[in-house]
Amino acid sequence: MSKEILEKLDAIEASVKTEAAAAAEVKINEAIAAAEAAYAEKVSALEAKVAGIQAPSIIKPEASIHAGVNRSVKEQLAQFFKSGGRVEKELKMFEDESHHAAYMKEASTLTGSGAGIGGRTAYDPVFAALRLANPMRGVSRTVATDGSSYQFRAKTGNAGAQWGYTIQNNGGATTESTTIWQLNLQDLNVQFPIRTAALDDIDGLEANVVDDMLVEFSQAEGLSMIQNSDQAAGTYGGTDGLRGLDQYAGAAATYAGGSVTTAAFGTTGTGSTSGLHSLATYDQLTTNANTVGAGNITYKDVINFVYSLPQQYWTPNAKFVINPVLLQQIRGLTDDQKRPIYIDGLSRTDGIVGQLLGFDVVVNKYVDTPSQLTTGAAGTASLYPMYFADWSRFHTIVDRLNMVMRRYDQTLPGFITFFGEKRLATSVVDPFAGVRYRSTGTST
């Protein structure tokens, strides 16, 4: 009985092993088939990619006379070496005289410049000539606004204080008042197209265009801040431009060397002529008159000019703003023994203009030259080549919060259109905080 049971158990175990082996074999075959299918799919994909690659065509170099002669000489030398003679061999380089002439002509061309005959051209980085950015930036006080106009307000007059123990009830004349003036922010803008092909072909062109445009804006505002009159048409913006320093009144009607006028506030209100103050103006001892290139400034003029500014404005913010031509004349001043008066006062060891009589110097070529550029009638125009002021109180630049810079890709087919716009205003704020130097001319 037990023997039969054992035999049945052995039979069952053998049957289970056989079924397991068959199942494992089926799984192995399925896995192999799946792997083969995946491999075949990857190979097919790779073959498709390879077939899609456009192999570069083999470029055969153009035949040249020079290459043909070299090849002929090499073949003759190889035959001579293999022959074993090695005694003497006459090499044939040219077929005839015309062949030699063609060879020499081609050789002379190849040994010349590579331009136009296959040589590679290298390119220097694109650049733009430098412009003088507005020197008034960093000198004048700068404020920002989000409005379209800006109003200045000044307290004027005296309280009328009097000496004495008893309480003074307007013991002296009380002249307390205010002066206001308001300016609209003026607009400076530009738009211009550049061909897309040019931007693609010339590396760095766009960056240079934008950088130079920004400096051009600064140059335009620098000229307008000094030279423009916002009361009449003119070169530097006219009624659309800024209120330039040169247009302010204050100079004496008749030129008087060595004299200085008194500053005063302009009219109060919101009209276009309000706030045109009178500036204290010092007249050079000897006028440059109508002489082109005249330089009659003296050491005494420089001293007189500095002391024309009230002492309370001799602050760390007090600076000279000088035309480079006048600065050159000042640096060239000599004493009675022909020795330079300014040796260390105007220069530092690094060669940069430093100080004059203890105050910083800012060079600004947009300020008037000290003499007329062309011969004309004497005293036909007032020229102001130098200012001395506490600039944090004397002059203010009002900027709109943001300058607009845009690049339009689809405005004009085939072109990229650039647009830039900024809005600002400028004004003398405290007319008592500065004095200007007049080298020639009549009143403004």
Image: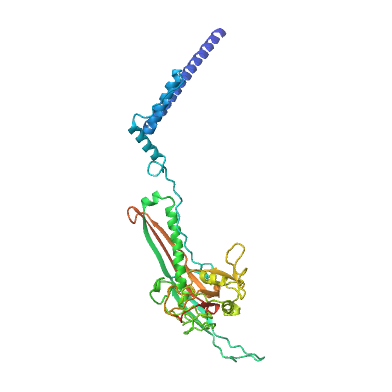
Quarter of the image where the N terminus is located: top right
Q: Quadrant of residue 318?
A: bottom right
Res 25 seen here: yes
| Residue 303 in picture, x, y percent from top left | 59, 78
Is the image coloured rainbow, by chain, by secondary structure, or in one colour? Answer: rainbow
Quarter of the image where the C terminus is located: bottom left
Is 226 drawn above or below residue 351 in the view shown? below
Q: Quadrant of residue 235?
A: bottom left
| Residue 148 in picture, x, y percent from top left | 43, 71
**In the rendered picture of this protein, how many numbered marks are placed on residues?**
0
User: Which residue is drawn at the image coordinates 47% and 85% (left, top)?
Assistant: 254
Camera-side residue of 299 and 233: 299
User: Which residue is drawn at the image coordinates 41% and 50% (left, top)?
Assistant: 202
Res 59 seen here: no
Camera-side residue of 85 and 8: 85
| Residue 39 in picture, x, y percent from top left | 43, 26
| Residue 243 in picture, x, y percent from top left | 45, 74
Is 9 drawn above or below residue 274 in the view shown? above
Camera-side residue of 142 and 323: 323
